[in-house]
Image: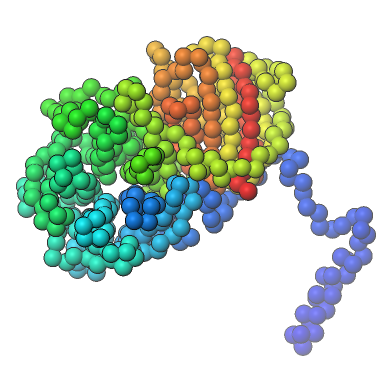
Amino acid sequence: MKTMIYSLALTALLLPLGSCSDEDPVLTQKDWDGTATYFASTDEMTFGTYYKPYVGYVGDPMPFYDPVAKDFKVLYLQDYRPNAETYHPIWAVSTADAASYTSLGELIPTGTVSEPDAAIGTGSTIYDEAEKLYYTFYTGHTAGQEVVMVATSPDFKAWTKNRSFYLAGSDYGYSRSDFRDPFVFKGDDGAYHMLVSTMEGTKGKLVEFTSPDLKTWSHAGVFMTMMWDRFYECPDLFKMGDWWYLVYSEKHAVIRKVQYFKGRTLDELKAATANDVVTWPDSHEGFLDSRGFYAGKTASDGTNRYIWGWCPTRAGNDNTNVGASPNEPEWAGNLVAHRIIQHEDGTLTLGAVEGIDRKYASEQEVKIMSQSESGVANNNGVYTMTGDSYMLFNRLQVHNKISFTVKTASASDKFGFSLVRGTDSKKYYSVIVNPEPGTTRKVNFEEEGEEGKGFIEGIDGYVFNTPSDNVYNITVYTDNSVCVVYINDDVAYTNRIYGIQKNCWSINNYGGSIEVSDIKVSVQE
């Protein structure tokens, strides 16, 4: 009886379909490419550029150039949501170009709830050529204690924890609960050195240990005192050309950014924060990106030095929920890589990775779908924009590269671009280049439109020098909701913006006069 009823119902459903003519089909596919209204899109399961595992998220990367395999290994803390009672095992990916990744799976599991690495924190990897052995030093974390631990491997596949080795801060007069993020490097003196982030009383310190063989370590004292009651997480020390650099992540909720110090010698570098007095190393005040990029650490193949960090997700997929102080952004997200650019004066900025750029090889048609009633003039593909004006372009795909050049009439002209924008959008999301006092500019993230809240304070901005020729070469990579913006060789601005894909985008002018040229959109093939 059930079968008969089902068959009758199915027949009744199909009969109207059969009566329709070919000229008047019941089901039609909307031509979205010909429209410019808002589309409620969501992230795909996979990311084409900025790696995320199928399950979970990337936390605190530990990049390492493997001299045996001649590639980069990026170890990271695997974040599950929710995490188990023990959490953050070390997983890894390999890459040759900081653009395409192969998962190596779990390398170092967490310990049991009764062991000192019930939870794992970040660290670093180094290869001992004499022993033909990889060493990964990492943080073991329990509710009341953090210690430095180590695991070794002959092949980067099978790892063995050394259960007889650990360094505890309390054994040397430092904090029991804040003693983490070991970074190991081989110094010019031939010895191995380890930096650890800790507290001495109420004061943040980077402390140093030394070893002749990676097995026995001696306390060498304080490497650097942290300024202004800050805490420098995820330290990374390297020499590039004639300069020494310390890259670190500022834990303080007000800042939460990746920064650096520099010095022509190691002693000069260490003295940068002496007595809590500092002259910031450059006009960027030591910042390397926005609050959308954290826990950045570097590795070099001898030609390029890259920095890897994670771009946090947003609670509720809310583009405005960025973690304004005293709140914090969601922990972990996607793996983002930049190329480190060193300038003649030793300052550092971040630029696009060549391998990433090569992935976006399929150029797309760019069409203006809508524009302001006035203020836009076209001269053979070069657009002059005056007053409050905009150009709205056709829909993006899921993985996009947007590039264009802006020349401002003066150093005070304000411009930007918007994503997740349609002709009917009550709110949309903009990256805006603002004039600042003196000779600087500032990149801000804003929610515009009649229902937009304006400046989103939690993301903060990025300050950079105004180009002397007033020319801004802008490149934007979007991979699902991850959005990375580069301006000349001066700015890297990482962000998370949900809903970019399948929606239109715009270039905007705010009151002044700008010239826009070379507008291009490419996608991954």
Q: In this rendering, does residue 499 appear at all?
A: no
Q: Name the residue rendered at 90%, 67% in the picture.
A: 18
* Left or right placement of residue 496 versus residue 398 in this view: left
Q: Position of residue 188 (x, y in %)?
A: 18, 40
Q: Is residue 416 above or below residue 109?
A: above
In what quadrant of the picture does the N terminus appear?
A: bottom right
Q: In this rendering, does residue 246 appear at all?
A: yes
Q: In the picture, residue 361 is in which quadrant?
A: top right
* Left or right placement of residue 42 versus residue 255 in this view: right
Q: Is residue 378 above or below residue 476?
A: above
Colouring rule applied to residues: rainbow
Q: Position of residue 132 (x, y in %)?
A: 25, 60
* Left or right placement of residue 82 versus residue 505 in this view: left
Q: Position of residue 342 (x, y in %)?
A: 36, 29
Q: Position of residue 234 (x, y in %)?
A: 27, 44
Which residue extends farthest front? 130
Which residue extends farthest bottom? 1
Q: In the picture, residue 164 is in which quadrant?
A: bottom left
Q: Is residue 456 above or below residue 378?
A: below
Q: Name the residue rendered at 71%, 30% in the picture.
A: 368
